Image (cartoon, rainbow, N blue to C red):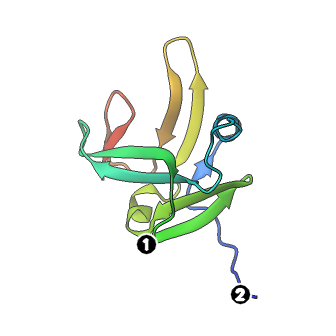
Amino acid sequence: MENSVIEAAPVILTEGAVKEIKRLMSAPDFDASQYLRLGVKGGGCSGLSYMLGFDQKEANDREFEVEGIPCIINKAHEIYLAGMEVDWSEGLNNRGFTFSNPNASSTCGCGTSFAV
């Protein structure tokens, strides 16, 4: 048996985000072999955009778990996302996942892109 070290998750999922992600994972056609991927990609009005979706694990991913949700993050993205909080908003004007990133030096009005 392989020794495993339990590390703190690099990101925080709020109760609302956990509830919505688990709702998505409970869909009949959900591929249970997939992980929740959190990451960044170039683009957006501030330089980097957030990525959140289900994906297969790759060699350069770090695996962790939040409230029973299997998650992955590309090790190179961790410096941009460490300590980030992901929430789910069901407001009248804004419905969807929101990102609160302590590493961002600036963010855009839409809340989905940032600069470091």
SS state under label 2: loop
Q: Is residue 31 above or below residue 73?
A: above
Marker disc for residue 60:
1
Task: Pick out the residue farthest to the top.
Answer: 92
Residue 49 falls in which quadrant of the image? Answer: top left
Q: Position of residue 81 (x, y in %)?
A: 45, 56
What's under tag 2, amino acid-wise? Glu
Q: Residue at x 53, y 56 (%)?
A: 83
Q: Position of residue 4 (x, y in %)?
A: 70, 81
Residue 45 falls in which quadrant of the image? Answer: top left
Q: Is residue 12 above or below residue 19?
A: below
What's under tag 1, amino acid-wise? Asn
Question: Would residue 73 appear left or right of 14 to someone viewing this image?
Answer: left
Question: How dense is the environment of label 1, judged by Cα within 10 Å: few (below 14), some, or many (20 and up)?
Answer: few
Q: Earlier in the sequence, mark 1 or mark 2?
A: 2
Marker disc for residue 2:
2
